[in-house]
Amino acid sequence: MDWLERVAKLRQWTSNDVRAPHKPLLLLYALGSYQRDADGELRYSAVEEELKRLLEEYGPSHPTTPAYPFHHLVSDGVWEVRTDQGPGSPGSGVRVLRSSGAAGRLAPELRAALRKEPALLGRLARVLLDFHFPPSLHTDLCEAVGLDLELADTEDVRGGGRERAARRQRDRRMRELVLTAYEFQCAFCGYDGMLGASTVGLEAAHVRWWAHDGPDEVDNGLCLCSLHHKLFDKGVLGLGEGHHVLVSRRFVGRSEASRQHVLALAGRPVLGPQAGIPPVADRHRQWHTEQVFHGEPRESASSPSTG
């Protein structure tokens, strides 16, 4: 059985490009749990709050529940659920999952494959991360689910031909084209640091995530400093109509640094791109606003009513 292919093709609910990372998040959490305790189970009532926090931080901005993937991941053949009455999931309702003592873990065949080939764990995690989340979030996400990729990477995770074939190939020119388009400065704050003749702390950010069919094209990119790239991918920052910076009302920062480097960006016009190069396409900007940006934007930092 090709577990990499199976994990790459998890069945997910889709509608109008809405992100649905519920199953990938649960499976990453389960892989982290397996790494710590190969024989352990995840009782729904015990892990519900932690899974909720994962969905709130890395899932879509609208409210959702971990009960959905806890039940439906069984159909992908990588997960099993049993209750106090025996094998089988009782359904996707929160109350019945709690009251029945529902507990889940990786499917027996997958656990056997991991025992036979321990490095498979790292490769599965890489597929989930690459297919569903931008690279800027990979380290934080692994920490959040308790997954140690360095421990898991006991052989080349870019190994097998089938795994490489399952991945879209990135355009290596993307970074150079985007940084050049924005004249090697952060489009949000203007940072333009150099170390000798090389830029430092500047990155090419995908507006529509590459993992969600975002193209490696300049009109889907922004040159951002490392801080603002991370905040953009976490939904703290966004792009508004007219290419102004959005800052989420859900973001709270009390220090002068937070006010200066984040809150003060609200309503600020994006810097760049240079003349003759297309700005971020509306379709990509809108995707990010609907699928990544959290909540409502703050008023412009220059507004008298801004607190």
Image: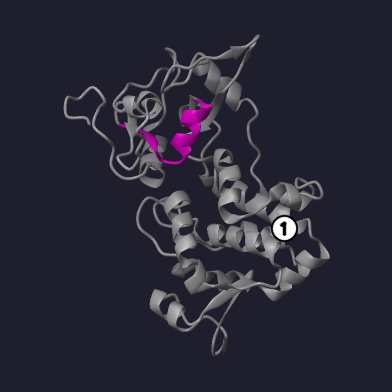
- In the displayed structure, 85 sits above or below 178; it is below
- Which residue, as the protein is rendered here, is positioned at the far front? 255
Choose between 165 and 271: the one closer to the eye. Answer: 271
Point out the image quarter for the C terminus. top left
Q: Is 237 drawn above or below residue 122 in the view shown? A: above
In the image, 34 versus 293, the foreground residue is 34
Say how many tags the image has.
Answer: 1
Question: Does the magenta portion include 257?
Answer: no
Residue depicted at 60% across the width and 21% down the height: 176
- Quadrant of the rendered image containing residue 232: top left
Please give the name of the residue rendered at 53% of the width and 36% of the height, measured from the top-left corner: 215
Q: Which residue is mark 1?
A: 121
Q: Position of residue 175 (x, y in %)?
A: 59, 25
Q: In front: 156, or 278?
A: 156
Left/right of residue 57 with respect to residue 251 in the rendered view: right
Query: Taking the image as drawn, is residue 55 in sight?
Result: yes
Which scheme is used to colour this image of the protein? one colour
Picture residue at 47% right of the left edge, 67% below the top = 48
Question: The residue under label 1 is which amino acid type?
Answer: Leu
Classify mark 1: helix, strand or loop. Answer: helix
**298 w.r.t. 63: above or below:** above
The segment highlighted magenta reads 225-240
Residue 109 appears at what percent x and percent y? 73, 73
Residue lying furthest top: 196
Residue 27 lies in quadrant: bottom right
> With 195 as the anchor, is 302 left or right in this view?
left
Residue, far bottom: 85
Note whether residue 243 is visible: no
Q: Residue at x 75, y 58 (%)?
A: 120
Mark 1 Cα within 10 Å, few/some/many (few <14, many 20+)?
many
